[in-house]
Image (cartoon, coloured by chain):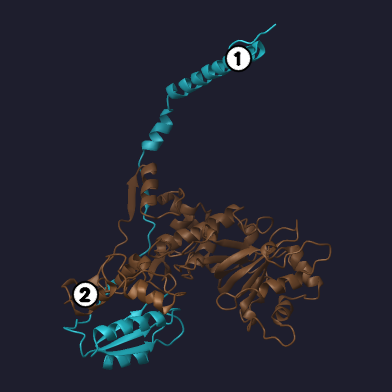
Chain colours: A brown, B cyan
Amino acid sequence: MISDFATQEAEVATSHGMPGLRIQFFRGPVWGKTRDQLRRMIVEGNDPITNRPVMQELVEKFTTPLTDAEKRTGELKQSEGPATFTDTPDNLQQMFLEKRWTDFLPVVLPTEQRVEDMLKGTSHLPEEPLGKMTNSGVFKPWSYPVRTAAIAAVMAGCKPEYLPLVLAVGSTGMEGVSVSDNGFVSALVINGDIRDEIGLNYGIGAMGPFAHANTTIGRAWNLLSINGGNCEKVGTTYMGTVGNPMNAINIVIAENEDESPFEPFSVRLPGKGYKRGQNIVNLFSGWGVLSARNWKYDVWQEDMNFPQIIKDIFNDQSPSLFGACAVLSPPIANFVKDAGYDTVEKFTQWLMTPPAGQEPHFQNPNQLHIIVTGGTNNDYFSIGGLAYFRSVEIDPWR
Amino acid sequence: MNDRKNGHSRREFVQGVASGAVGIAAAGLCSNLVAAETTKPVPAGIKKASAEKITVLNPLGVPPAVNLIPQARRLDTLEGKTLYFVNDGYLGSDNLLYEFMDAFKAKFPTTNLVYRKKSGMGFAAQDPALWEEMHQKADAMIIGLGH
């Protein structure tokens, strides 16, 4: 195991009942190196933590007798600590920051009154179990009730009317930020009347932090992940090598259903039976999205073939992990429709069709996703890798 | 007429004095403002609010219970034992394990070294058949944990 993961692996081992697991560390990364490099760097090298020869340590791990601690059985109790904390607001802000209970920004301190007011946004009882997060399946799960999600919503600055959406997301157990060293991003795509009800932005700036609802809901998801799920702790439950700026509040998209020529994303999901107007939150994860203008197929001319540009960019995406996802502004979606693809299904079928004699780049239409949001002020759109994971009805959480 | 005084023209000198005077006057005003700010008393309500204590709720979820698993017994020696090298499928793990096997072979020529690649989808997938094989045949195991 490469030494950069030492703290994390100690925590993983503990969470699985083996706090003293004998792990050998060495200098990494491993992939991309020749056998000669691996031999010299690792096998004949030193453990970067102890500075002792790796081979010597390996043999010792097999032959040194177990300590009493390594022979222990029974239960190791873990506690979340006291139910409340009392101090001045400044001291509490500092404490929350030092304990890594925040996203490094000041929070709205979760007083009993504020949490009580937040809980008016749902009929569910505070103690009702809501979800569990395992952080990509690596750690044993932390669990959290409705109250913990309400606390996260208060800290994020949410209004009580946003709580059903926060609870719907929390019920899935999907973390806002994955532990992976890849630096994944999570996304929500919201459909239904709730978009207008709570003021989600789906016009100019739709994917960005430009409305109270979008920004605070994305933040609440992260705070629930950090505190309810023990996620996003750098070095243990977060290992993104270079990080991802979209992790700040995740990507929170409300589809522009009024301006889109297509059915809402949730309505198009096969086998779900969701109706237009029904309040659904759809969860995605992946690399994120980037303006289509950054790709080599970008042109700026009188006669634009947007469907072909989208297809060319899609075929440059890796089909392996997250497929391809296009977030189209309404003008671009209407270009696609006017080109003869009056449904997303037709468009996806064409996107998957390779040139004659070639193999399709994507094997399954479920690898491709089209989302419509944003303003009508220009012909812009974004593409990247975001895979759809699941959908949840929001209304049961009112 | 030569108005230069110490290398500067009279006009420059006057302008310099004027701007200096303005600067000094401005500084004087600013210092008065600063002085006023530092001596202005903090309203009692604000002082009381910042010192007043409040109670907040613990934001944490419930951590899982940990059932301790004792470590497997250690060996008195690796000589004559069977040592498995398991690759979880991460890129480069095979080459690294091959190099470790070469090193163990040189150091412990009587040790039986067995290489296996774990099956299943993903690095964390279980491989019950391999676990059973090692349960039956292995004295020790090294697994390359790539992720």
Residue A259 visible: no
Q: Which residue is mark 2?
A: A74
Judging depth in this view, the residue of A191 and A61 nearest the camera is A61
* Residue sitting at x 37%, y 84%: B98
The numbered mark at residue A20 is none
Q: Secondary structure at mark 2?
A: strand
Across and down, in percent, residue A317 comes to 62, 73
Q: Is residue A37 left or right of residue B136?
A: right
Seen in the picture, residue A307 relative to A299 is either above or below; the reply is below
The quadrant in which residue A16 appears is bottom left
Across and down, in percent, residue A393 comes to 56, 70
**Chain of the residue displaying label 1:** B
* Residue sitting at x 43%, y 27%: B42
Seen in the picture, residue A98 relative to A6 is either above or below; the reply is above
Across and down, in percent, residue A296 comes to 69, 67
Residues packed near mark 1 inside 10 Å, few (<14), some (14 to 19) or many (20 plus): few
Judging depth in this view, the residue of B19 and A284 nearest the camera is B19
| Amino acid type, callout 2 | Gly
Q: Which residue is mark 1?
A: B7
Distance (Cα) linking label 2 and label 1:
90 Å
Residues packed near mark 2 inside 10 Å, few (<14), some (14 to 19) or many (20 plus): few
The quadrant in which residue A334 appears is bottom right
Q: Find the residue positioned furthest to the top.
A: B1
Callouts 2 and 1 in the same chain: no
